[in-house]
Image (spheres, rainbow, N blue to C red):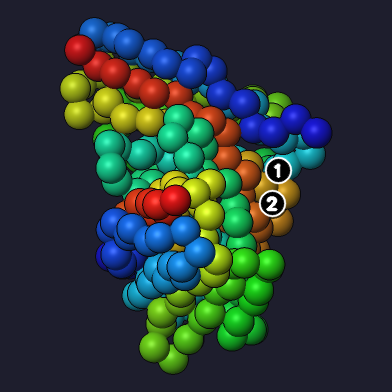
Amino acid sequence: GAGVSQSPSNKVTEKGKDVELRCDPISGHTALYWYRQSLGQGLEFLIYFQGNSAPDKSGLPSDRFSAERTGGSVSTLTIQRTQQEDSAVYLCASSLGGGSGTDTQYFGPGTRLTVL
Amino acid sequence: GENVEQHPSTLSVQEGDSAVIKCTYSDSASNYFPWYKQELGKGPQLIIDIRSNVGEKKDQRIAVTLNKTAKHFSLHITETQPEDSAVYFCAASFRGSQGNLIFGKGTKLSVKP
């Protein structure tokens, strides 16, 4: 079946502009995660959605970052007033969910964001 | 805060040799330890995982061992092939959130023909 999809695959923007990154999880997966991967680094957790529960926003680096998940499916990560240090690959993952913390997470291909 | 340390950061082996990557974690409540393989320009793909109720798991040429007392776990790849070349990430579940994982910084594995 279809995996996690993300769009756009690449985004180049100017410092100070807002950007929106989209994630379509695997159908039926109730959990959705956003991570950030800077060049040569590991994955940094940003935010986690589980069903209709309040999201875990503990990884968001600043109030310029926000995310929504509409209808329990598609998610949008928004970065306002982008800065050069926001340049990274933004990865989305989904899992069956249930809150056990041991679900297998399936990753999308990522969106490479470049802030000039 | 909680973290996962991964070593080595780069590893080069000859085709047919074995490769071992090691990780240590700090959260004693971690109970799920997946390993991901990331090829250039792609998202990470799960290759094997282990839960805290077992000490070892094997899938063909790949095996993972877990030592909960010492809080470390390792990935073993035997009979390496050039297509094994990629960046490998370990991760551990984090009790601070029921869903997220803490990742190591990755190991770039190069398998030379």
Q: Distance between the residues labelled 2 and 1?
A: 5 Å
> Which residue is painted at 64% across and 55% down in the image?
A104
Q: Can residue A93 be seen in this view?
A: no
Give the mark, 2 or 1, whose residue is nearer the N terminus. 1
The answer to whether A6 is drawn above or below residue B33 in the figure is above
Quadrant including the N terminus of chain B: bottom left
Q: In the rendered structure, the residue with mark 1 lies on which chain?
A: A
> A68 or B87: nearer the eye?
B87
The answer to whether A1 is drawn above or below residue B60 in the figure is above
Question: In the image, what residue type sits under mark 2?
Answer: Gly
> A37 or A46: nearer the eye?
A37
The answer to whether B3 is drawn above or below residue B89 in the figure is below
Residue A84, image x, y percentages: 19, 22
Question: In the image, what residue type sits under mark 1?
Answer: Thr
Q: Residues within 10 Å of mark 1 (few under 14, many from 20)?
A: some
Task: Confirm or deny contact between disc 2 and disc 1 (CB under 8 A).
Answer: yes
Residue B33, image x, y percentages: 53, 68
> Which residue is painted at 38% across and 30% down in the image?
A89
> Which residue is painted at 48% across and 44% down in the image?
B38
* Residue that label 2 marks: A97
